[in-house]
Amino acid sequence: MGYENKSVLITGAGSGFGQRLAERLSGMGARLVLGDINEAGLEATKALCTGPVTLLRCDVSKEADCQALVAAGVEAYGGLDVAYNNAGMGGHGPKPLHEVTHEEFDLTLRVNTYGVFYGMKAQIPVMLQAGSGVILNTSSVAGILGAPFLGAYAAAKHAVVGLTRAAADEYARKGLRVNAICPAFADTPIMDGVVGHLGLPKEEAFAKVSSRVPMRRVADVDEIVQAMIWACSDENSFMNGQALPIDGGLSAV
């Protein structure tokens, strides 16, 4: 899908979607700059890759870290073709909105929303200088639907969709495309947290959380990553400003 020699930045690359995405894109010839707060996870991801990889510890809730990650990619590869603002966290466990603390709400937004804002703020000037670039932000089906008892997470992910649509309009005539992906439940470390909160065996927890999904299951990581690869491919050059649900039909009902 046209990733040969492309400079690709991925946040949250130490596990889940980001780790598998890095492995897949490396096999397609991409040159990677990978960030995560988990340095051991980054090293594990690097071991899965076959091409050039630049690693940097990156806490996306800190603007300086996001700027440094972009700078590392520019220094290593001379520019930035594609950016995946993928880092995120589940936030507080399920609870009514009035019980969510200020600290829980703040942390969820700092990682899930500010992380995307800081990422784009650093990435866009580099892409503008080149006259082209593609950004994909990881939102959630909770960013396009209500998410009862996950109020802070839903707020953060709705904000990601808003940022995506604003940026898509602002920069489309300057050669940039900006989209978001909105996965439903998937077998990632964030889901491990959900399983822990539910206090059920993994299979029972997965069945419970997917009970409203028409396909009655959670997604495999590769099912989401394949869409992420397609979304930023050269062949998909006319998609812009979209919040793409990959959710087993949840947003259709």
Image (cartoon, rainbow, N blue to C red):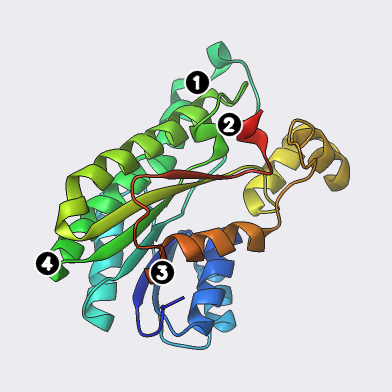
Work out whether mark 2 precedes mark 3 in sequence or the reverse, and give the earlier one: 2
Amino acid type assigned to the residue bearing label 3 in the image: Glu
Mark 1 is surrounded, within 10 Å at the Cα level, by few (under 14), some (14 to 19) or many (20 or more) other residues, namely few
In three-dimensional space, the C-alpha distance between marks 2 and 4, rounded to whole angstroms, equals 39 Å
SS under mark 2: loop
In three-dimensional space, the C-alpha distance between marks 4 and 1, rounded to whole angstroms, equals 42 Å
Residue 179 coordinates in the image, percent (x, y):
38, 50
Residue shown at 46% from the left, 59% from the top: 37
Q: Say which of 87 and 58 sits in front.
A: 87
Tags 2 and 1 touching, CB below 8 Å: yes
Amino acid type assigned to the residue bearing label 1 in the image: Thr
Residue shown at 50% from the left, 60% from the top: 228
In three-dimensional space, the C-alpha distance between marks 2 and 1, rounded to whole angstroms, equals 9 Å
Which residue position holds label 2? 92
Which disc is residue 235 wearing? 3
Mark 4 is surrounded, within 10 Å at the Cα level, by few (under 14), some (14 to 19) or many (20 or more) other residues, namely few
In three-dimensional space, the C-alpha distance between marks 1 and 3, rounded to whole angstroms, equals 44 Å
SS under mark 4: helix
Q: Quadrant of residue 253?
A: top right
Work out whether mark 1 precedes mark 3 in sequence or the reverse, and give the earlier one: 1
Which residue position holds label 4? 129
- Which marked residue is nearer to the observer: mark 2 or mark 4? 4
Tags 4 and 1 touching, CB below 8 Å: no
Which residue position holds label 1? 101
SS under mark 1: loop
- Which marked residue is nearer to the observer: mark 2 or mark 3? 3
In three-dimensional space, the C-alpha distance between marks 3 and 4, rounded to whole angstroms, equals 22 Å
